[in-house]
């Protein structure tokens, strides 16, 4: 999942744009980009897979001058793009995943369209989005038409001479939030980007809502709808602890997940720990509920190492997982540890690079407690889980059944014998003393939204 940030300011916005975009760095590892509109368009795009966003743009942003700006941390496509269109020249960024990119691009190519952004070896979905918008009678009509055609999700910021147009994905799977500061406006995926820049939240965009922010302020262009199905994984893992979605704090949800894990657990242990960083909030909640001390047997070497889950290449994920966590042997040796993790996707990193370090440092027992149910389906709406074959739960089912089972409904029921056998297999594969997942109803309770307003596809296929 990418992160996007935009700003409309009475002064040069470049500095605020730099830092506001940088506060989305946890949302992607491939490209970072900024565009500023003043007397002309200024744009920069850099590969950030081996360097931090700030360091790539710290000198470049000083050459940008204008009142409007958009930025992006992208998990896949190089962006922002600057497009010449019948609506005038505009810059555009997007967060989400257009699942039918190749199909739609093929239709446009058959109509005589061309695509220029092929540097990554395929169609740039942001360019596709821009071309689909350009087919509308008006800009707003074009954005509406975009959502009629795509499968997946896309929240967008589009900047032209009259300001920034912002559209939240029609089913609300990716968030957009507006902040205000002394007449300046910002719009972002992550509300944590507002805090140190002095913006206060004034509006969470509704699913499908389109707004315009210009020199005269904020104007609604298309009313949103109530069919919200926001990504639950934002609270469990993807989002930053200081952010909130739909007014619900990420950190507090993680604490509630940990509390519910502990409430339904009876394991005897000496301490609770979280796999840093995203497992920490869950572990704090577990410690609060259980009365066990929260300690840090693993610490993350933050400078230079990001998330091991988001890079697209397995060798990069393995390198980050190997290097970023450092064991504290004096805390580990001889202790029974409850280890809270946000989730288990493949399981290989947890086994090879986390639990292995704890066992080698002398842990007596390791009880793994993920803060969401087993991941059973690849994500269709963002670049998170990418295929069935990489999900450890599917490996467990294949091992138990002897073949790739299409109907896995029995394994989705956390009260069934097959579910218990699947969890037992995964725990054995991980070399954990015990493994117990947070159950789906508890996760929904921890988030606090009605079940029908949450996307639960990764766990239930819904």
Image (cartoon, rainbow, N blue to C red):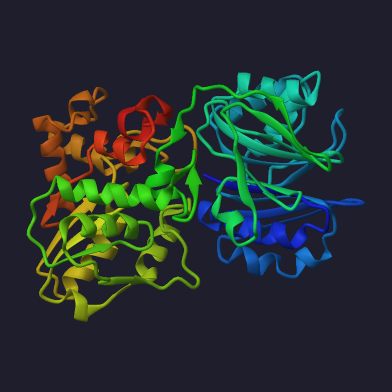
> Image height check: is 402 above or below 359?
above
How many numbered discs? 0
User: Residue 21 location in percent, x, y?
Assistant: 64, 55
Q: What residue is shown at x 37% (from left), y 28% (from top)?
A: 450
* Residue toward you, 123 or 207: 207
Q: Residue furthest front?
A: 182
> Image height check: is 65 above or below 386?
below
User: Residue 52 location in percent, x, y?
Assistant: 59, 66
Q: What residue is shown at x 19% (from left), y 40% (from top)?
A: 396
Q: Quadrant of residue 437?
A: top left
Q: Is residue 123 visible?
A: no
In the rendered image, which quarter contains the C terminus? top left
The answer to whether residue 121 is left or right of residue 331 is right
Q: Residue furthest right?
A: 39
* Residue toward you, 103 or 200: 200
User: Residue 131 location in percent, x, y?
Assistant: 74, 29
User: Residue 60 location in percent, x, y?
Assistant: 77, 66
The answer to whether residue 31 is left or right of residue 365 is right
> Image height check: is 262 above or below 446?
below
Q: What residue is shown at x 50% (from left), y 71% (from top)?
A: 304
The answer to whether residue 278 is left or right of residue 125 is left
Q: Quadrant of residue 317?
A: bottom left
Q: Is residue 326 visible?
A: yes
Q: What residue is shown at x 40% (from left), y 38% (from top)?
A: 232
Q: Quadrant of residue 46?
A: bottom right
> Image height check: is 44 above or below 386?
below
């Amino acid at each position: 999942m990418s992160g996007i940030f935009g700003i409309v300011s009475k002064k040069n916005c470049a500095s605020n744009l730099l830092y506001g975009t940088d506060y989305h760095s946890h949302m992607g590892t491939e490209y970072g980009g900024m565009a500023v509109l003043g007397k002309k368009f200024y744009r920069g795009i850099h590969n950030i897979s081996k360097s931090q966003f700030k360091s790539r743009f710290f000198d470049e942003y000083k050459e940008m001058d204008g009142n409007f700006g958009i930025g992006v941390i992208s998990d896949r496509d190089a962006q922002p793009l600057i497009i010449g269109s019948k609506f005038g020249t505009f810059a555009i960024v997007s967060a989400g995943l257009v699942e039918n990119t190749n199909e739609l691009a093929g239709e446009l190519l058959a109509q005589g369209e061309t695509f220029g952004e092929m540097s990554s070896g395929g169609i740039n979905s942001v360019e596709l989005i821009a071309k689909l918008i350009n087919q509308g009678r008006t800009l707003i009509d074009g954005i509406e038409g975009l959502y009629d055609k795509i499968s997946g999700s896309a929240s967008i910021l589009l900047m032209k001479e009259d300001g920034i147009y912002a559209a939240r994905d029609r089913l609300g799977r990716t968030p957009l939030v507006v902040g205000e500061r002394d007449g300046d406006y910002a719009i972002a995926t992550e509300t944590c980007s507002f805090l140190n820049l002095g913006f206060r939240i004034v509006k969470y965009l509704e699913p499908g809502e389109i707004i315009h922010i210009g020199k005269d302020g904020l104007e609604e262009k298309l009313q949103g709808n109530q069919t919200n199905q926001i990504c639950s994984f934002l609270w469990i893992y993807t989002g930053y602890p200081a952010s909130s979605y739909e007014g619900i704090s990420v950190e507090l949800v993680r604490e509630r997940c940990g509390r519910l894990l502990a409430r339904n657990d009876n394991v005897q242990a000496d301490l609770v720990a979280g796999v840093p960083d995203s497992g920490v909030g869950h572990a704090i909640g577990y410690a609060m509920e259980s009365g066990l001390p929260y300690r840090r047997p693993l610490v993350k070497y933050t400078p230079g190492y990001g998330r091991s889950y988001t890079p697209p290449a397995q060798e990069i994920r393995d390198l980050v997982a190997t290097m970023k966590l450092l064991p504290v042997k004096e805390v580990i040796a001889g202790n029974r540890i409850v280890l809270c993790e946000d989730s288990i996707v493949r399981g290989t990193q947890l086994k090879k690079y986390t639990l292995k370090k704890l066992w080698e440092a002398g842990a007596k027992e390791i009880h793994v407690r993920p803060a969401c149910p087993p991941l059973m389906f690849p994500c269709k709406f963002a670049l998170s889980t990418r295929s069935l074959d990489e999900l450890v739960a599917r490996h467990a089912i294949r091992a138990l059944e002897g073949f790739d089972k299409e109907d896995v409904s029995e394994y989705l029921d956390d009260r069934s014998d097959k579910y218990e056998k699947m969890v037992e297999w995964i725990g054995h594969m991980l070399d954990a003393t015990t493994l117990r997942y947070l159950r789906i109803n508890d996760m929904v309770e921890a988030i606090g939204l009605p079940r029908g307003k949450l996307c639960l596809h990764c766990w239930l296929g819904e």
